Amino acid sequence: MEAEMKLSDADHPLVQGKAGELISLGASREENLKRIFLYVRDEIRFGFPPEWDKVRASGTIGLGIGYCNTKATLFNALCRVAGIPSRIHAGLININILKGIFPAYAFPIMPGAGGHSWIEVEINGEWIPVDSYINDKLFYDSALKLLQSSGRKTGYSISMEKGPASCEFNFGEKGFVHMGAVVEDHGVWDDFADYMASDKYLSLSGFKLKVFQSFTRTANRNIIRLRAMK
């Protein structure tokens, strides 16, 4: 994959149109950020697209589902349209964060860690990370109850290994949703495509991609079931 094929396609009409709905010219940067955050969190429900990571921001709007990497791509694009400096921070995450979502039989044949990303935005001259938009609130609320009852600190797309979890609009003050499971830092990137073109990215292709696609179909059914729990 060539890095020139930007995934945060901020110039796409779908992205431009959605940004126009969310952004108010008279609002503060924080107010516009919150509108973008709530849209990416709840209107793009947590789930796995068949294309895995290789989904443009405009594609995620059309699909209406996304996970860490594709939601970060969309968040990044919307910030660009809003004139909010943003970047993608990438790394590896403990695969156990998917326990309770992926089928149990998948874990013995999956690597111990997988590719992960979150967004950073510049506020008052400081780059601040946020990842609490990854799980939509309906799913997060059910997942948190299940994780707490399991006695584990990581699973159901939540990690509390390094502190409290949150799906609220915050920059770590109330907690992150995935950061506790990050095991390796791969630095910051202008676009997720740049990261995918690097030697740090764990590429999935051929048979591996087909296997993961079969896992994600099961995972998406599980997510729908968990989201419906009271």
Image (cartoon, grey):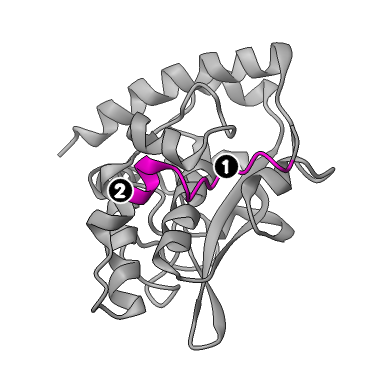
**Can residue 182 be found in the magenta stretch?**
no
Q: Is residue 10 magenta?
A: yes
| Residue ID for mark 2 | 17
Instruction: Report helix, strand or loop for mark 1.
Output: loop
Front residue of this view, candidates 17 and 136? 17
Sort mark 1 into few (<14), some (14-19) or many (20+) by Cα contacts within 10 Å: many
User: Residue lying farthest bottom?
Assistant: 124
Q: Check residue 7 in the rendering and tell me which mark sits there, or answer none.
A: 1
x then y, percent, for residue 123: 47, 82
Q: Amino acid at mark 1?
A: Leu
Distance between mark 2 and mark 1 Cα atoms: 17 Å
Outermost left residue: 230
Question: Can the viewer see residue 46 in this picture?
Answer: no
Q: Is residue 189 left or right of residue 144?
A: right
User: Quick one: label 2 or label 1, which is nearer the N terminus?
Assistant: 1
**Residue at x 73%, y 42% (from the top left corner):** 3
Instruction: Out of 7 and 96, give the one closest to the viewer.
Output: 7
Magenta-drawn stretch, dominant element (helix, strand or loop): loop
Residue 146, quarter of picture: top left
Relative to 99, residue 92 above or below:
below
Mark 2 or mark 1, whichever is nearer to me: 2
Residue in view at x 50 percent, y 56 percent: 76
Q: Where, quadrant-wise, is the C terminus in this rendering?
A: top left
Q: Is residue 195 above or below residue 161?
A: above
Please give the range of residues in magenta.
3-17
Q: Amino acid at mark 2?
A: Gly
Asked whether residue 35 appears in the rendered view, the answer is yes
> In this image, 92 relative to 128: left or right?
right
**Percent coordinates x, y for residue 18 in the rendering:** 30, 49
**Residue sitting at x 55%, y 87%:** 125
In the image shown, does 150 or 130 lie closer to the viewer? 130
